Structures are given as C-alpha cells and as structure tokens.
Image (cartoon, rainbow, N blue to C red):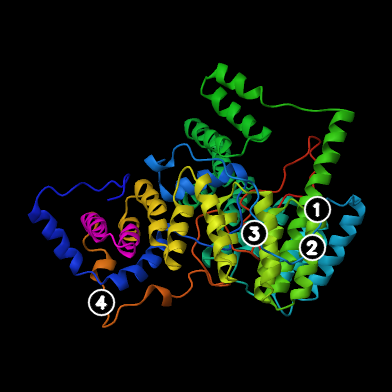
Amino acid sequence: MAVGIRIPAMKTSKEILSVKARAGAIRWPLLLASALVVAVAIIGVAVWLTPLDDDEIMESVAAESGAQTGAGAADQPKVPRKLKRVSVASLNLPTERLDIEASELRSELEDLAAELVAQDAKDWRATHIAAQTYAELKLTTQAEEVWRSCVARDVQEAGPYAGLGLLLIESGRDQEASTLLKDSYAKGIESEELLIALAESLENLGQLDEAEAVLRDARGKYPQSSKLLLTLGRVLNQLEKFEGAEANIRTAIAGGEDTQSAWLALATALARQGKTEEAAKARKNISVQRGPAAESAFQQQYDEALTRVACQVMLAAASVAEDSGQYDQAEKRIRRAMEIDPDHLKCYMSLSSVYRRTDRLPEALAVHEVLYQKQPENVLNALNLAALAQEMGHIDFAISALDAAAQRETSGEIAHAALAKLRMQVGQFKEAIPPAIVVVERTPSVEAFMLLAAAYQGSGNAEAASAAVARAQQIDPTHPIFMQAAPAQGVPLQQFPNPFPPNSPVSQPSGMQPPGSQPSGSQPLSGQSSAGQSSPAQRPFTP
C-alpha cells in the first residue's frame, strides 16, 4: 500500500478475506468508469468558470470543500509562471488601456443603449441592460421609460423590477416603489437587490416594522449579503433595537461594507447603548474631505466608476448578442471592453465562450493561455486551460497544467481530483495514485476513496483498492455507488464520455459564474461622493 494513505491495516486473515469478499462484488470496469463520475462530484465544477480574484480563490476552494491542509500538502515546490505554449492562434488582444475621454465614453454608452432598445422585440434583457445604462449615466427619464416597457411585458426576472424600484426611490417616489416591489414580491419574483430596495422604500415611508420583517426574511435567504445586513442594522437603529443593530452592522463591515455610512450607523448604535469609547473609535473611520482635494477625489471616483460601468455594459451586451447567435457582434463588444479595461478577467472568459460556441478552439485555447499567464495562482484558470487542451488532444499539456495547479493547491482538492481523473482517463493509473491520495487526505469521503480505489485497481494493486473500497463502505454503506445494479458488461474506461463538454451547463460553487453571464451584482458599483452627488455607478448590473 502506498505511503501516506490513511487506511488502517487489517489485523486478521478473516478480516482480509471479508474485505476481499466485499470488494469481489464490485465490478471493477464499472468502478473505473464510476470513478470519473465521482471525481466530478469531488470537484463540484470542472470547467468554464469565471475566475475569482487572487485573494478570493483559495479561500473559496477551501470553503467549498471544507478541507484542511493534509499531510500531502506541505512544502509544495515552486511552479513556473508560464507553461510551454501549445496554441498557434494569434489573437492581437489589447494589452494596454486606451486613453478615452469621459465624455466620449458616455456618448458611446448612450449609443449602445439606444441600439439595445431597438432589440426589444428579440430579448427583454437587451431592454433591461439599456435601462441600466441610462440609469448609470443619470439619464433617469430614459431609464424609467425603458424599464417600464420591460416590466409591462410581465418579465419573470427580478432585475427590471429592482432597477425601476431603485430609480423611483432615488427620485423620492417611495410609495410608487413600494407598490411595484410589493407586487413583484407577492408574485414570487424576488432577488437580494429587490428585497433591499423594498425595505428601503418601506423605511423611507416610516413603515419600519414591515421593513424589518422583509429584511429578516431576506437575511434567511441571503445570509452573506453585507448590504442587506447594513440595511437591517440601520432599520433596527431607528426601532431602538441597538444591540441587534450593532451586531448586524459589525458583520456588514467585516463582510465588505466598510463605508462611512456604515461606520456612522455603528457609532450611533454604540452611543445609544452607552458604549462611548467604542463609539468614538468608530467615528474615527469617518472623514469628510472639502475643497479642491474633495473635487479631485470625486472626479477620480467618477472616472473609475464610468470605466467600470462601461466594461460591464459591453460584456452584458455581448452576452445578449452571443445568445442570439450574433457572434461577430459579441466578439466586437468584448474586444471593446478589453480596450476599456484589459485587466478585466471576465472579458477573457466571455471571449472564450464565443470562440467555443463557434468551434474556434485554437483561439479559445490561446485566450485561456493568456488568462493563465495573467493569473496563474487561480486553480480554475488551470482547470479551464487543461479541459480545452484535452478536448483538442493536447493531453501532455493538459496534464502539465493540472500538475502545476495541484502543486499550487495547498488546500482543497479540486486540481488534485482533476489530475487524478485525467491520468486515469489516459491509462496512467500509477501516476494517478499520488493526487488521489491527497484528495482522500483532504476530503475523506465515499467519492474520494472510490476515486483512489479506481487508481489502485487500474495500477494492479488489488489489495489497496479493496482497502479503499472498504473505507468508502464504512463511511456510507448505502451510498448509490454501492446500490446501483451492475450491467451485464462493464463500461470500459476508454469509452467513458468526455467529462469536459465545451458548452454543457455545470454546477458551480457560489460566487462563480459561467462565461457569458454577468455578476449577480449584490454590491453597488460605487457609493456617494463626499458632496452628496451621485457617481455614475449606483446600481448593480443583473441581466
């Protein structure tokens, strides 16, 4: 048995025979095929995921797996930043941000919004994106008109209702907003943004008890929403429930709502509880800029927000074009987004999606090579690159990419499970054993042990395979993998379908999204300026 696997040794010959008898009931060809399925269950998601930021990726992987660093994860060797390139396609992608005047960018966005409105009869999302664009540019009359036309079509998605509701609130029409959002809520059309907007309209109308009830219901559905918790804390302050207000606001700040309004609300809750020293500390996080410095800061904030909005609008519009089969238009919009911000990683995922849909796999592979070079620490970039390389027949390159990702993966098991699976697919069973052991060490589940069992059996180590099966059965003897009826003929490993189809829907961890879609936008794109003026990014994009 290989060193490092945590399977207790059998103590008697009777126990050994018992294990072998149980293992004998397993159809090994079927197990090998099943191992590929359970490997997907271990990974949870294989390909075509939008990369997370560098500081989020490993935390997210660990959270998804519930894993801790195992014995096989210590002192991983350094991995070169670049893999040997296999793509021959030339993309000529933008590498530097174009110097675009704010006025020019605004004009371009207005033209795009008008173009999207013209597509109204084809896709309501085009109308919604156009309304969002008008709203971000503070063209509120156009935004309201377009959103109302969208809502009038009885759309069953929350985005248009939430967008129109927020617009009405910002214009002081809280009663209209409340009526609209309550109606949507009653129909079961809701989202995090819609519920927050509904609560804000009720808060502004002085209906605090109802606002609290809406927010508490929303908190059960969206417990990680920092903005929702801050809104609840603010309402609880007004209801003089200061202890609850403090707890919710502190959680919101820790979750990312580190804003001046949040610190002000926290200072209020603390002061009303008599916690004067803590309130004073909270107020130190509140600063007010005045004069030329404030004007300069606001202009910089405005320009950055406009750039961010422009990039999101382009990608959202590209998604609509892609879904309607207008692939040239989609590519054009994605490339324009890259010119606006070449470091926006979702641009590359969106471009890859277009190339894969149009069977331009060499170009798609080149895109993923660029993405890997930009963010090699992100394990999902390596998985995407390896999946596409495998589909194109570059098996050695795919293995190299996964091996590099596994060496970087100091917690979790996504890359190790993918590497073990791929090596088994190409008959490298002995080489699949080490990464499979790491998976078992970090996530000792039925799926992990069956993956390891398949690697051992394929390499000819029947005793180790039997022990791994025994451990899996100890964990859950009623697991479906043990209950399924064995077919008359086993399924050879080589005939198992490719687990990386280019455009199939896949399950995914929270916070990650397939290419072509847009972020859920649980957070606004920016806040208020020091002068109380609204910057051009107040509303999340939720096409």
Q: Is 256 above or below relative to 405?
A: above
Q: Position of residue 331 (x, y in %)?
A: 76, 69
The CA span between labels 2 and 3 is: 29 Å
Instruction: Depth check: give the residue in front, 123 or 447.
Output: 447
- Please give the residue where the numbered disc 3 appears in the rendered image: 162
Q: Are marks 2 and 3 in contact (CB under 8 Å)?
A: no
In the image, 406: left or right of 170? left
Counting the numbered discs, the total is: 4
- Please give the residue where the numbered disc 2 appears in the rendered image: 335
- Amino acid type at circle 1 is Thr
- Please give the residue where the numbered disc 1 appears in the rendered image: 95
Quick one: label 4 or label 3, which is nearer the N terminus? 3
Quick one: label 3 or label 1, which is nearer the N terminus? 1
Asked which secondary structure carries label 1, the reply is loop
- Please give the residue where the numbered disc 4 appears in the rendered image: 486
Q: Residue 245: within the magenta?
A: no
